[in-house]
């Protein structure tokens, strides 16, 4: 897998790595440190236009938007990562079991995923949120649940493809246990496919989290989140356009970065 | 890959277009219309903030519902735009010297929307229904004092009450509905107001049409009014700009500034007492020192500046400054700016030197309260209180916070019906509206005295004491009376600003 050989320069991967790297760096730094306090308000600095002092300007409470974008990016990245981790783990487990063993379990799980896929994902998350209540953990949980089916399908189809491969047959003949075959022999071989879907999933998670915060059911104010900032900024679109532009561009940047990254990985594999 | 760049480009272009379209339309705004003649007919769309809790006028509790039902129902008397009572279904009334007997004379030929003339039977039924004489459950608490409703002749009704109360007459604004129709009110509300009910769709709005038989001749002007529920302040702005709503009364300060050129924007004092309401029975808020500390910690001037554009009036107890005779200025008690040292000292006394966690539940449809919440959280942080905001749906707020009293703190507004007693009534220990669980024996005692007092000066003295107790015991952290910023289509005239929470559409008309 990892053998280094001379390849054509993969510009998607480079651009993706650069963009996501930059965004992640900003977000992770934003969790621990921001240039200004993200909540300190100042009546004197209400709606300052972007300047060297405030790179992205200030909002209706005189808070530094750049600092809030950093914090919001951090929040978004953490939530999205946990969502992907949650849904990815369950996706792999269920996908591996159903794909390898088939049978009744496969039938049940697949029908359930069909049912979940039948609903628009935002509707389903809204239902879960309305049962559990809003807040960070519940957003992670509800998005996690909604995203599981997409991973199950991909992992399952890969396991079905590989379960009768020659090297698996041999492993079986040599007496390897089922769990060993599942997770030591097959799993590493589906990683490149899985990785692409993780990137896509990450993107979807970011957009979904922003969407939920935009609707006011995600991260609660005064904590910053990109989606919430967008929705707050909507009222000031004409008086302070920078307020909407900053979180908007941040979302575009991250999503584009991960899309390029995913595309880069796919090409890397094909080449 | 191309797709991605297209997407990016489209996003950027959309943003550019959106931010550029702000100046459109300013050139075509019409000039001064004040001399124009009223035109009969036409329809108006009024944006409202929340769904309706009940179409039954006796059961509706939300102020946002009452502002609409004002157009459909009338009582024996009703309020005018100056907060004074005028006769409505009754043409005249007398109160006996001992304050125990009210005699109403019905106006000739007032018709219900179903075409029937209002009779004494209808009045008797309505008053017995709200007072609980009918089935034992009073629907309007101030009217449970009614002992008997007697029909003297076909135009005269006599009401006997248990104890005298000079403010009771204001409660006779309670809607008069056809005899026996109580059960049908939710589906088919019938009243005597200037507009009749047409349809109601949950989450969408309510439509009313002109009542051609209305007793005030010449009113209303409009054929139809559509009260449309607008989900958020942001969409209200978009709908105003798009022309899909004509009147919206709850603009934020920045929205008002934005609409200045294209709409008639008017500021008027509201009748809402905004406060950080504290649940007095939940630890640590059951300690008066903690509540006082919160009052000291808040910088009301800053809150007013940030969310009200400086247009609000700062208060420290539950009374509207516009009720001049009864209002007592208590702003010196805690000051209008933050006193962090004093707050920390009180917290330390109470054993919370390291602060505590406080969850503030706020109805998410009220942008104004949500923004206030953000400022409050920041100010409480300065004294070590770790406050968090929990945005809740309006219906959840009513269920859990207002009626269920399952909360620590909330930011909301309570409204007034123009009698000073109304605002203070709810803080009696056993009041059903005492959602902050304020318990104070002195308060209860003085309130009863105030109610019984016949002499206005004496009454005033009691009300002053009540305001003082509420303030000093820090029943809640009272913040401000926000100004209402109302946007009106420039071609609409005749909109009246009431000191109470109603939207009277009967006098509104279009001009050409």
Image (tube, coloured by chain):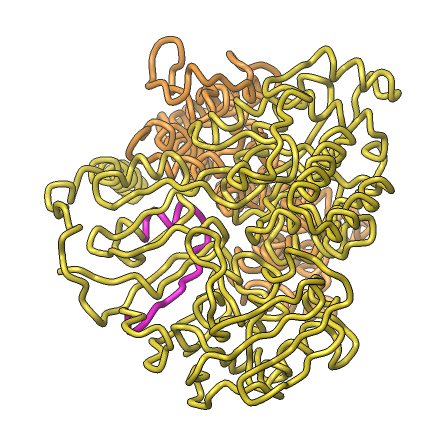
Chain colours: A orange, B yellow
- Comparing B122 with A262, the one in front is B122
Coordinates of residue B15 in the picture (x, y in percent): 28, 37
The residue under the point 52% across, 46% down is: B271
Residue B229 falls within the magenta-colored stretch:
yes
- Comparing B148 with B421, the one in front is B148
Locate residue B215 relative to residue A213 in the image: left or right.
Answer: left
**B109, above or below A207, in the image:** below
The residue under the point 48% across, 34% down is: A226
Q: Is residue A268 visible?
A: no
Locate residue B189 relative to residue A245 in the image: left or right.
Answer: right
- Comparing A156 with B7, the one in front is B7
What range is drawn magenta here? B222-239
Coordinates of residue B29 in the picture (x, y in percent): 14, 46
Q: How many marks?
A: 0
Residue B277 falls within the magenta-colored stretch:
no
Image quarter hosting the C terminus of chain A = top left
Coordinates of residue B33 in the picture (x, y in percent): 15, 51
- Comparing B495 with B97, the one in front is B97
């Amino acid at each position: 897998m990892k053998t280094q050989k001379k390849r054509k320069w993969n510009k998607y991967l480079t651009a993706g790595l650069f963009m996501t790297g930059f965004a992640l760096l900003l977000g992770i730094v934003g969790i621990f440190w921001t240039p200004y306090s993200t909540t300190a308000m100042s009546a004197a600095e209400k709606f300052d236009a972007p300047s060297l002092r405030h790179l992205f300007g200030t909002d209706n409470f005189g808070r530094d938007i750049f600092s809030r974008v950093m914090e919001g990016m951090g929040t978004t990245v953490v939530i999205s990562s946990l969502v992907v981790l949650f849904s990815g783990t369950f996706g792999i487990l269920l996908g591996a079991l159903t794909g390898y063993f088939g049978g009744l379990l496969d039938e049940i799980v697949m029908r359930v995923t069909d049912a979940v896929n039948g609903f628009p994902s935002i509707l389903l998350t809204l239902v879960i949120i309305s049962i559990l209540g809003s807040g960070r953990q519940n957003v992670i949980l509800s998005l996690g649940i909604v995203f599981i089916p997409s991973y199950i399908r991909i992992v399952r189809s890969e396991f079905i493809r590989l379960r009768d491969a020659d090297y698996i047959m041999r492993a079986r003949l040599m007496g390897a246990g089922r769990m060993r075959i599942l997770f030591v022999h097959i799993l590493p071989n589906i990683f490149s496919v899985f990785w692409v879907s993780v990137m896509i999933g990450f993107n979807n998670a970011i957009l979904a989290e922003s969407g939920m915060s935009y609707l006011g059911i995600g991260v609660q104010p005064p904590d910053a989140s990109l989606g919430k900032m967008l929705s707050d900024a909507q009222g000031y679109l004409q008086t302070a356009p920078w307020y909407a532009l900053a979180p908007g561009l941040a979302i575009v940047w991250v999503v584009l970065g991960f899309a390029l990254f995913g595309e880069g990985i796919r090409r890397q594999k094909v080449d | 890959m191309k797709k991605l760049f297209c997407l990016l480009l489209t996003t950027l272009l959309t943003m550019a277009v959106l931010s550029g379209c702000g100046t459109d339309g300013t050139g075509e705004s019409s000039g001064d219309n004040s001399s124009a003649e009223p035109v009969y007919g036409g329809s108006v769309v009024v944006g409202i903030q929340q769904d309706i809790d009940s179409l039954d006028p006796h059961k509706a509790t939300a102020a946002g519902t009452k502002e609409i039902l004002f157009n459909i129902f009338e009582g024996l008397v009703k309020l005018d735009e100056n907060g004074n009572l005028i006769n409505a279904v009754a043409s005249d009334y007398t109160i006996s010297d001992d304050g125990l007997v009210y005699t109403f004379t019905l106006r000739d030929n007032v018709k219900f929307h179903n075409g029937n003339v209002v009779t004494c039977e209808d009045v008797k039924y309505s008053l017995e229904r709200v007072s609980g004489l009918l089935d034992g459950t009073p629907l309007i608490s101030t009217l449970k004092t009614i002992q008997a409703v007697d029909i003297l002749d076909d135009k005269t009704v006599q009401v006997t009450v248990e104890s005298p109360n000079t403010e009771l007459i204001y409660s006779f604004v309670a809607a008069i509905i056809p005899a026996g129709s109580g059960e049908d009110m939710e589906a088919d509300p019938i009243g005597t107001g200037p507009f009749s009910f047409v349809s109601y769709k949950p989450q969408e709005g309510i439509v009313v049409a002109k009542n051609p038989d209305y007793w005030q001749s010449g009113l209303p002007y409009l054929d139809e009014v559509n009260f449309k529920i607008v989900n958020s302040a942001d969409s209200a702005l978009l709908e105003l700009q798009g022309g899909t709503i004509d009147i919206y009364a709850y603009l934020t300060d920045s929205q008002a500034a934005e609409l200045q050129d294209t709409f008639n924007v008017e500021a008027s004092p509201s009748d809402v007492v905004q406060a950080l309401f504290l649940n007095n029975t939940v630890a640590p808020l059951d300690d008066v020192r903690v509540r006082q500390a919160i009052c000291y910690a808040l910088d009301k001037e800053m809150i007013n500046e940030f969310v009200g554009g400086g247009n609000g009036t700062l208060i420290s107890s539950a009374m509207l400054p516009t009720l001049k005779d009864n209002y007592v200025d208590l702003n010196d008690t805690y000051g209008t700016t933050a006193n962090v040292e004093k707050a920390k000292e009180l917290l330390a006394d109470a054993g919370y030197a390291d602060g505590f966690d406080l969850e503030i539940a706020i109805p998410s449809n009220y942008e104004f309260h949500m923004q206030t919440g953000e400022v409050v959280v920041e100010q409480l942080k300065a004294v070590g209180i770790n406050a968090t905001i929990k945005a809740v749906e309006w219906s959840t707020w009513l269920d859990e916070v207002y009626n269920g009293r399952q909360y620590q703190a909330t930011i909301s507004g309570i409204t007034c019906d123009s009698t000073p007693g109304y605002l203070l009534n709810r803080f009696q220990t056993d009041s059903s509206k005492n959602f902050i669980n304020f318990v104070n024996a002195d308060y209860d005692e003085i309130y009863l005295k105030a109610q019984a007092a016949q002499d206005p000066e004496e009454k005033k003295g009691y009300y002053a004491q009540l305001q003082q107790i509420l303030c000093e015991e820090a029943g809640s952290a009272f913040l401000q009376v926000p100004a209402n910023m109302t946007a009106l289509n420039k071609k609409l005239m005749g909109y009246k600003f009431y000191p109470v929470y109603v939207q009277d559409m009967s006098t509104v008309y279009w001009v050409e």
